[in-house]
Image (spheres, helix red, strand yellow):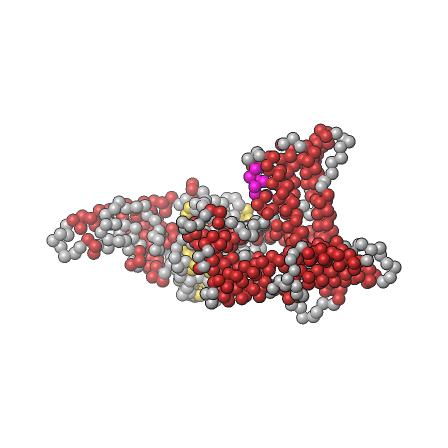
Amino acid sequence: MASLLCLFLLAAAAAATSPGRLVPYDLLYADGVRAYFARDYERAAELLQRALHSYAGLRAARRDCGAACGREAAFLGEPPSAGPWEAALFGPVLRRADCLQHCLGQRLGSPPSAHRASRASRRDFERREPYNYLQVAFFQLKKLDQAVSAAHTFFVANPQHLQMRDDIKKYQRMSGVKSDNFRDLEATPHWEAYEAGVQHYDADEYLQAVVKLEESLKEALSALEECRALCEGPWEDEEEEEMQLGLYEAISAHYIQVLKCRQQCVLEIATKPGRISATEDFIPSHLDLLHFAYDQVGNQALAAECAASYLVFYPMDEPMLKKMRQYRTDLGEDTAVTARENIQHYVQRSLMEKKLIYYAVEHLGGTFDDPDLWTPNELIPENLKEKHREDREKQKQKTLDAEERVKRGSVPFDGVSVTMDSQQMNGTRRVVFDGVLTESECKDLLQLTKAAAEAGDGIRARRSPHTPHERFEGLTIAKAVQLAQSGDVDWRDARLLLQASEKARKIVESYFSPGSKLHVSFTHLVCRTAVEDQQEGRMDLSHPVHADNCLLDPEGQECWREPPAYIYRDYSGILYLNDDFQGGTLFFTEMDTVTVTAEVHPKCGRLVAFSSGKENPHGVRAVRRGRRCALALWYTHSQEHAEQEQLKAEELIEQRNVKQGQADREGCQRSDDSSRSCSDTPPVANGGARSSSWRQKPDSERTQHPKKLRTRDEF
C-alpha cells in the first residue's frame, strides 16, 4: 500500500514540471565562465542563463520531492511492529530514501548524485555571481535592458561591490535605460511584502498593512519550509577526521547537521539580500505588527488571534498578556481565542529540534548557535547555559563588527591600505594601515624631534614615567609651532607634524566613524630610547597594559570608565616613524592583561587605530636598543574636548601663511627688473613637507586668499 501511495505522489511531483533532463548547474556555469573569458558573449549569456534556470529547477525539485515524500513516509504512518526496533526505525527511513531517489530522478532526468556541486559553486550562486558575468555579456551584446537587470540583481545582494556600484551609476546616466529595468530578478516575495507592510504600518495605513504583513508571513513560512527541505542534502564533513564514524555515530552526526541547518533557516529568510545581519524575531515581529494593525482597524478577533500566536513565542510577555485579558473581556469569556495552528506547529517543531540538538551537544560534543531569542531558558542544559550566553554575546559582537565593516567608508587617500582588520587581529574595532607617510616624511619628522631636542626645549629627554630603563621625549604640535616661531625648527616640519595628525584623523574617521565627526583630543610625538647600560635582566614593559578611556581592573575583569581616566576618548591611534630599534612592539590583550591577542610591529608610515575602551587593552614591549618614535593620537566625538592648543597652532600656521603669501605677492610686484620670476618663489600657503608632491601651483593659486589649513589630497 505504501509503495502505491509513493508512486502516486512521485507522479504528482514529477508532473509539476515538464519532463526532460536537467543539466547540472555547476557544469553549465563552468562552461559559461569559460565562454565569457573567451569573449564569446552570446554563448556565455546562454549558458549562464541556463545555469541559473538549472539551479532554480534543482531547488524546486528538492523542495517538492521533500514535501511529497514527507507526506508519504512521515515516520509515523504505520503502527509499530512487535519486531526488532531497527526495523521499526530504519524501515520508514529506507522508504523515505527510496521515495526521494525516484522523485528526484524523474524530476531531474538523471541521478541526484550528478547534481552535487562543489561548495565554491554553491557559494557563487548564493552570492548571485552569475549575474556579475551576465551583465557584462548582455552589455557587449547591446542588450541594455537585460544588462541593467542583471547588474541590479547582483548589486542588491552585493552592495559593497565597488565595481558594480560604478557600473550601476553608469547605467543610470545612460539615455536608453528605463527605471523599471532596475529590477531584482531574484527578489524574495516575503521581503517585498514585509517592507511594503511596514511602510503602511509606519504611515498608520493599517488596512493596507495587514494585507501585506499577512502576505509576508505566509511567504516567509513557505520560504522557511523550502530552506528546511534543502537542508536534507549530502553529508558535509567540515572537519576531516582520521577515523571514519561508525553507523550510529554517522547517522547521528548527519541528522544533527540537518537539524542545525533547519534551525538556521529562520536567519536566512530574515536576512534581506545584501545585508549582513538578520532581522531579530522575524516571525514573532509579524504577529506583533499584525496584532496592533488589526486592533487599529477594529478587528479585535484577529488582533486577539495574533496576540495569542505571539504569546506562543513569549508566554510571559506582560504587555501582551494584558492585551489578551482585555480582548477576552471585550469579546466575551465564552469566545475561544487560540493561537494560529501553523504558528503552534512551527514552535513545537522548533522546540523538538532544539531539544535533540542540545542533547547531542551535551553528550556527543559540538556547538550550536541558537538563532532564536525566544528559546526557553529551561530547554538549555544547565552545563551549557553559561556557554550559550557567551556564544550569544560573541555572535552579537560578530554581527556588530560585520555591520561596522559595511558602514565603513573608503580610505580617503591614495596609497593607504588596510593591512590587518579586526578579524585578523582577533579583536574588536582594531585596524592597521600602511602607507600613511612616505620614507621622506618620516625622516623629516624624525629630524624635527632632533632639532627640538637640540633647541633645549619642548622635547627634553627624561626618564620614562613607565620604566627606568628608557628615556622619554615628547613634543606637542603647539610646542613645535612655538619652536618654529623662534627659529629653532623648520616651519615646514612643524606644519608636517600638524598635517600628519590631521591625515591620521581623517583616515580613522572614515574607517570607524563615517558621517560622525571625530575631533583630535591630543597629539603627542613621542620617542622612547633604550638606556644602554640598563637592559640586562630587564623584565618590565615600555608601557604597561592599559585602556585609554577607563581604569583597567584585571582581577575583576572590568574597566571603570570614570576619572582620572580620559573618559571622553573614543578612538586611539599610533603613527610610527621608524623601525631601526629593537623591541617596542605594540600588543593587545584580553581583560586579564596577560592573554595576548594581537601584535603590531612598528614601521615608517604604519598607523594602528582602535577604539579606546575596555575591548582594547594594550601595551608596549620594552625598547631594548635604539630609539622608537611615533605619533600618539587620541580622538573624541565630543567637540568640547577637542584639543585647544592644536586649534591655536592651526591658527598660528594660518596667520603665517597669510603673511608669507602677502610677502610673496609684494616680492612678485618688485621683480619686474629682476631675473627671478614669481613662479620661482617657494610655496607657503597649504604647504607641506619638503616633498615636491605637496607643493602648491604657482602664480594664480598663490594670489588667492589662503583657505583654512587642511590636509592636502596628495598628502
Q: Can residue 487 be seen in this view?
A: no
Residue situated furthest bottom in the rendering: 242
Provide residue 304's location: percent of width, then percent of height: 69, 35
Up-down: is 319 above or below 627? above
Instruction: Say which residue appears at 16% left-offset and 49% top-offset.
Output: 669
Q: Can residue 147 be seen in this view?
A: yes
Task: Tell me if residue 64 is in the magenta stretch.
Answer: no
Instruction: Say which residue appears at 63% left-offset and 47% top-offset.
Output: 220
Provide residue 642's location: percent of width, then percent of height: 41, 44
Q: Relative to the observer, which residue lies in front, 696 or 481?
A: 696
Quarter of the C terminus within the rendering: bottom left
* Part of the protein shown in magenta: 194-200
Instruction: Say which residue appears at 44% left-offset and 57% top-offset.
Output: 142
Q: Relative to the observer, which residue lies in front, 175 or 133?
A: 175
Instruction: Say which residue appears at 32% left-offset and 50% top-offset.
Output: 481
Relative side of 307 to 505, left or right: right
Residue situated furthest right in the rendering: 82
Quarter of the N terminus within the rendering: bottom right
Provide residue 628's location: percent of width, then percent of height: 41, 61
